[in-house]
Image (cartoon, rainbow, N blue to C red):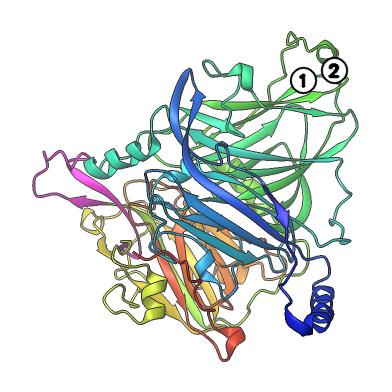
Amino acid sequence: MEYYKLSAKPCSSYFFFAILLLFAFLASFADAAVHFHEFVIEAKPVKRLCRTHSTITVNGQFPGPTLEVRDGDTLVIKAINRARYNVSLHWHGVRQLRNPWADGPEFVTQCPIRPGQSYTYQFTIQNQEGTLWWHAHSRWLRATVYGALIIHPKLGSPYPFPMPKREIPILLGEWWDRNPMDVLRLALFTGAAPNVSDALTINGQPGDLYRCSSKETAIFPVEAGETILLRIINSAMNQEMFFGVANHKQTVVAVDAAYTKPFATNVIMIAPGQTTDVLLTADQTPARYYMAAHAYNSANAPFDNTTTTAILEYKSAPCCAKKGQSLKPIFPQLPGFNDTATATAFASQLRSLSKAKVPLEIDESLFFTVGLGLINCTNRNSPRCQGPNGTRFAASINNVSFVLPRRNSLMQAYYQGQPGIFTTDFPPFPPVQFDYSGNVPRGLWQPVKATKLFKMKYRSKVQIVFQDTSIVTTENHPMHLHGYQFYVVGSGFGNFDPKNDPAKFNLIDPPERNTIGTPPGGWVAIRFEADNPGIWLLHCHIDSHLPWGLATALLVENGVGKLQTVQPPPLDLPRC
Ligand code: C2O
């Protein structure tokens, strides 16, 4: 599917000169490649848990194709929509400098690609390396439309750790034994929570503990003694997960395509949207070992309590020489579903590898309450009010429940100066102060629906404190900011204390990420410099919370001159 194209079309008598110019041009981009791909989004039969579904895939693959590039490379991906749904694709974690047009969230940076239409995403990876991923960003299509995006260092630059013998992408996912788009549609009709998934998956496979699944369990062969790199991606819709490998320690070396100081752990916690790279040395008795993942459920709510597995198989294991399956793999110990202590202890060990460029003076200090809410109904018995006590579920930031526009995308409306699509009066702090993580009066449970953006100057130095609320339930909300990497400078339980907590911030080597969870009933603080103009979605990566409104968008104004200004949109950008 992939080919490289580094040519221009010289013509007439200037041919020789043009060739010279071309070589000079190419030399200045030594080794940077352009990768062309076609992503055909189409329904294909996929059989899981004994049943075949007509599943939306990319090029017939589930999970979708892995993209492998180097830092500095350009990707040109023609997305062709042959499905019956509107679709858009997002390159999760790619900074997309001055290029929001390639970012993908529907009605934010583009109108969706209609059935039968296509759109070409073109973007360059600039100073990023590690594990990212891509996924659909329209309704619940990302349940099956996702894949890994692996960025290797520039040619000749090494990893900051010994070269692993092999690299294995581990995509954690969720499977519904029905059409995920219908699961969402039903939930949005009734106002109740969407059904939980029927299986968790590793690389699209539930594994040995589910019906009709063990024949296709993912198996990863290793040579005894070698060290491998697992690129773990939580591409699940709604579920934070614990992940472990029986008898093997994992050494964390990167999260969200940013290197960390290495540390060893038995288990990792990973939230939807996040990636974690770990080194694993096959230093145990040659045998078969389960890798397993199950939920970290921080909320007081139903969840998928099943366990997905794959197998790490030593090639020299006695069983496997003859392909016999008799030797039962050893099972890892995973923490309890609600083990917040382990999740917190894991997160607290993350440090960026090198000294971080954390903004020290802050221009925009924002305090965002994040959490669920309930919309009251006049008729509590209405089929549309099947949430708790005849309400409809909602979610909000600072009491604003975000509504996507329908008539145009935010970015297109902004670029064209079209009024009436959004306002820029998103509140920098909650309209009412209350005991956020305590017992919240019922009168504060109902958010207001609106399309409000927060506007800031180019190069503003920004701090956002995300404060989880206990409205309906406290919960770990993985907050994802498009177009940026940020530093996670602090976190804690209870209410953020603006007097005493900032003194404890790590401004030396905080981890750099694109997605960070609020501790349940707690807060997390991030900092970054707004050096990427455009409109960038900020949202909870739990996909049941996003349609309920747990989102807003940052409008970062242009700076001065071309290099600080959003580039013009491509001609094939879909219109609404
Ligand atoms: Cu990975 Cu807006 O998402």
Give the x, y percent position of residue 253: 76, 51
Examine the rendering and report whether any part of residue 329 can be seen: yes
Q: Secondary structure at mark 1?
A: strand
Disc number placed over residue 317 in the picture, else none? 2
153 over 529 or under it: above or below: above
Queried whether the magenta region covers residue 391, the answer comes back as yes
> Which residue in the protein does label 1 denote?
288
The C terminus lies in quadrant:
bottom left
Q: Residue at x 75, y 44 (%)?
A: 278
Q: Which residues are magenta?
A: 374-402
Q: Are marks 2 and 1 in contact (CB under 8 Å)?
A: yes
Identify residue type, mark 2: Ala
Disc number placed over residue 328 in the picture, else none? none
Give the x, y percent position of residue 205: 58, 28
305 over 90 or under it: above or below: above
Give the x, y percent position of residue 251: 78, 44
